[in-house]
Image (tube, rainbow, N blue to C red):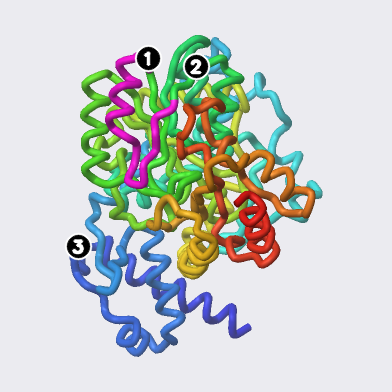
Amino acid sequence: MDEQADSNRTSVIVARIGRMIDEGLLQPGRRMASLRLAAGEYGVSKNTMVEVYDRLVASGRLEARRGAGFYVRAPGQRPSEAPPPHMSEAIDIVSLLREQLCQVHPVRVGDGRPPRSWMEDSELGRHLRVRSGKGDLPIEHGYGDPVGYAPLRAQIGLMLAERSIQVSPAQILLTFGANHALDLIIRQLLQPGDTVLVDSPGYYPLFGKLKLARIEMAGVRRLPDGPDLDDLAMQIARHRPKVFFTQSLAHNPTGGSIALPIAHRLLQLAAQHDLVIVEDDPFADVMPASAPRLAALDQLERVIYLGTFSKTLSASLRIGYVAASPALARSLGDMKMLTVVNSSGYLERLVSDLIASGQYRHHLKRLKERIGKATRSAFGGPERLGLPVFSRQGGGYYLWVGLPPGLDDLALARRASEQGIFIAPGTVFMPERHQPDGDERTTGMRINVAYADDPAFMAFLQAELASAS
């Protein structure tokens, strides 16, 4: 009963402050009262005011400035949701799919599923309830909007604005995670025989997708502060690629992040050679909003930006998104309909509710603390064994740890497996398995910071290094 009363008080305060902001009584840029003062003013606890402010941040009315408090956000920074375009005829494959998803027409004799009223008392409805601040939301048994749940796209737009990436919700397409987004982009932009550039070492599931689509790959050497620009220029001249797939921040597998001068020069090269850049940012929500991002510098002119909630909420929660130019976002939406029809409206509403309630913000705070603590202790083990760590920037889940020349990383992984230890050998992360002799990129392994100091792993590694020496 007390919990319900607290929730009601929170909602009342959120509504009151939100109304004051919307009506201009609280001007953009104004600093809000501290948590202590606001709690006293409204007669609630500091924890309640934390939730109030977090909800207002999630709705786009406030912004949190680290170490400085909460400030009123300018209205222009809250992108509005444009209504879906009216569809006059359903005559081809894509338009028929779009009509079944968007439901513009009131008379639905051509529909492909039973009416919602037939499903209202289904067992699914009894066991699956999506909650909001106003109580249970009705279960939607239809396909839903083909581009994804509109409130979540608007919330993602606000999150991107914090990263200085200005987009409208119409430019955001929800997907089944970042891997699904990569698949859509490959299908849309490339043909068998095309050549693309990828990070080396880089994201190995991407390599599998490209091989499946019969796309040729050329690796661009990854340095601690981003792609090697000399190598990039050489690969562009040699292969004339259409696309460069890269991860700018908390790079998988090396853990490094791009430096601002490198990002600026990379975009200059891309413009000079008409190169499209796909920037995958899976750890965006635990990285600083001010960190250099290609999409922020380019504003989605030639950069396609990917994000996901799978790395920060759950690997089983397959919710990701693409942010792109309006025309490309529409084309990718059509490709999504033709391939998977739609993503999961249930999961999208769940994530949206977590953001709106402020719970996602609380979760991210705890997650960042855990990542930071694990990363600080992760460096010690490899360095005590004399193994170099590629980058000390951190922020994500990974370290790239070098191995002595001549030590076969694949054989090492097999021996570890026999002892119940899973190792990610460096060779797997190379687009070309046969690198030049002495190439230090292959003589390494990816380590998850959460497990880096595991005693069994460290003992195994120490024994292997002693044997190799």
The image shows residue 365, relative to residue 193, as above or below, that is below
**Which amino acid type is marked by label 1?**
His
Name above or below for residue 436 compared with residue 255. above
**Residue most toward the front?**
469
Query: What residue lies at 61% left-to-right and 27% top-to-bottom?
Result: 341
Residue 146 shows up from this direction:
no
Where does residue 202 sit, x and y in percent of width and height? 48, 36
Q: Which residues are magenta?
A: 219-241
Element class at badge 2: strand
Give the residue at mark 1. Answer: 239
* Disc 2 + disc 1, Cβ < 8 Å: yes
Q: Is residue 18 magenta?
A: no
Q: Is residue 404 visible?
A: yes
Q: Residues within 10 Å of mark 3 (few under 14, many from 20)?
A: some
Q: Residues within 10 Å of mark 2 (few under 14, many from 20)?
A: some
Between 25 and 35, the one lying in front of the other is 35
* Residue 230 x %, y %: 28, 29
Residue at position x 50%, y 66% in the image: 380
- Please name which of the two marks, 1 or 3, marks the residue nearer to the observer: 1
Secondary-structure class at tag 1: helix
Residue 216, numbered label: 2
Q: Residue at x 33, y 55 (%)?
A: 289
Q: Earlier in the sequence, mark 1 or mark 3?
A: 3
- CA–CA distance in space, label 2 to label 3: 50 Å
Residue 335 vs residue 199: left or right? right
Q: Earlier in the sequence, mark 2 or mark 3?
A: 3
Q: Report if the CB atoms under discs 2 and 3 are less than 8 Å apart.
A: no
**Dot 1, how many residues are within 10 Å of its Cα: few (below 14), some (14-19), or many (20+)?**
some
Q: Where residue 187 appears, x then y in whole percent?
A: 52, 19
